[in-house]
Amino acid sequence: MKHLIASRRGFLKAMGLGAASLAMPRLVSAAGETKRPSILFIMSDDHASQAISAYGGILAKVAPTANIDRIAKEGMLFKECFCTNSICTPSRAAIFTGKYSHKNGVYKFTALDWNQPTLPALMQKAGYHTAIVGKYHLHSNPQGFDYWSILPGQGVYNNPNFVEMGQEHDSGWVHRSRKRTHYKGHVTDVIGDKALDYLKNRRPKNKPFVFFCHFKAPHDMWEYARRYEDLFKDIEIPEPDNLFDDYSTRTDAIKRTKQKIGNTRGESHTAFPEETKGLTGRALKKKQYQIYMKKFLRCVRGIDDNIGRILDYLDESELAENTVVIYTADQGFFLGEHGLYDKRFMYEESLRMPFIVRWPGRIRTGSVNEAMILNVDFAPTILEIAGKKAHKEMQGRSFVPLLMGKTPSDWRESMYYRYYFSHFDTECHYGVRTGTYKLICFDRTKQWELFDLVKDPKEMNNVYNDPAYQDVVRELKAELKRLQDELGDDPNDRGDNPRTGLD
């Protein structure tokens, strides 16, 4: 496979401090003991990397994310972070278990079985205070947390209800909670307030913490706080150059999906009929795109502003110097590319996750890493930061060496993805991505797509049937089979038997 895989080694690009900063020790207590760092894990829902200005792209100048960028300037930005199943609940399960969907039992929108080893429980066992606030979306009562306050299901944007620790139902299902607490205000601000309350008042001061601060935004239907009403009012949001993709070389999957901008079949999240009356054709889609993007980006601004509040408090309280700050999203998202919104597909915009991490004194500031990391790697990495090994059941791998500027010689050069049919009529599929190619199998329809990511990074030209690529097809199919065998995934498993641990 050597000629198929672009080398991802040695891609740490430094800006700012020199390599000497990597050798700086962790903080040491008055007793001479090394203090384990606390970890603040901030995650938004559906926040695509192309909507973070630190990643560059067409939105960087019109919609800067100053506070998220601050984490990147003071830490490391990963360009090749991918999810293993691009949908909210399965990705969150993968993050907490370090396992793929077929191993953790969460294929679609089903509950997580907390009886298996999980990151919160292992961190709790390691002596960390564990907490989660905000969007949770794993449906079974949280376990392994010393403190939690979560939205039931998706939650709502304005004046939300939360299920607080102690209000849970004995059945184990979050939605059956005995009571809910009502809060006034926009959900992003409420979560920001709750984050500050935890950091100021609820965490014990004599032990490290791992705190999961999970924002609901910018999940549809993109109901931003009213104070952002005029943001982007007189600005035209740049369009991706494949907004009007005609899918001429693609399989039936993208042609049939309902997650197209302006779709009116079924869920019409981006049709905006009242605002687009009288428009047709390209003018209609252009208007729908502008409305969609302004709503989305206004939600993002709310997140960024609240992250600024949290970062400022870390500085003011002198927590910053020994707190690892991570920013990510539960998967990628389409922002008009291929004429799409939402996620699910293995195409780059949906597959790629933002991942930015700041670790003062340990990570070279302003660095960029292009090694391939996955959401199943998050748990092993956080455990190693805490001085613990990953659980033997975890399928991911710690990338702490990457944070230190060192790429192991055996670091992965391919990754496996699988999406199980749920809604939007988006076909289930699995595939393999290397540094240079991507092979996707839509297993119900027996159709394939192959993209040359070097020549065609925007995935416009399916070359699966091109005679010039038949050696590539054969080798990638072999790699796909190798990964399925290695990870224990049965291609015939449709995900119809989730394992929830609940009756």
Image (tube, rainbow, N blue to C red):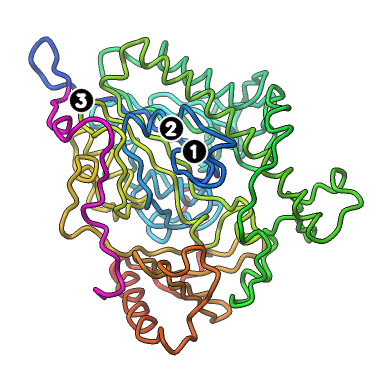
Q: Is residue 18 magenta?
A: yes
Return the x and y of residue 32 as percentages of the image width and height: 7, 15
Q: Nearer the viewer, residue 339 or 165?
A: 339
Q: Which residue is farthest right?
A: 278
Q: Residue at x 68, y 39 (%)?
A: 294
Q: Which residue is mark 1?
A: 53
Q: Which residue is farthest left?
A: 32
Q: Residues within 10 Å of mark 3 (few under 14, many from 20)?
A: some
Of labels 1 and 3, the one closer to you: 1
User: Which range is magenta?
Assistant: 1-26
Pointer 2 or 3: first along the chain: 3
Q: Quadrant of the N terminus?
A: bottom left
Return the x and y of residue 375 as percentages of the image width and height: 38, 49
* Secondary structure of residue under mark 3: loop
Tell me the chief SS of the magenta region. Answer: loop
Q: Which residue is farthest bottom?
A: 467
Q: Are marks 1 and 2 in contact (CB under 8 Å)?
A: yes
Return the x and y of residue 354 as percentages of the image width and height: 44, 44
Q: Which residue is mark 2?
A: 69
Image height of 53 relative to 477, above or below: above
Q: Residues within 10 Å of mark 1 (few under 14, many from 20)?
A: some
Q: Nearer the viewer, residue 293 or 34?
A: 293
Q: Residue at x 51, y 63 (%)?
A: 458
Q: Which amino acid type is shown beneath numbered disc 2?
A: Asp
Image height of 424 relative to 290, above or below: below
| Residue 36 badge | 3
Q: Which amino acid type is shown beneath numbered disc 3?
A: Arg
Res 37 quadrant in image = top left
Return the x and y of residue 89 as percentages of the image width and height: 51, 48
Q: Which amino acid type is shown beneath numbered disc 1?
A: Ser
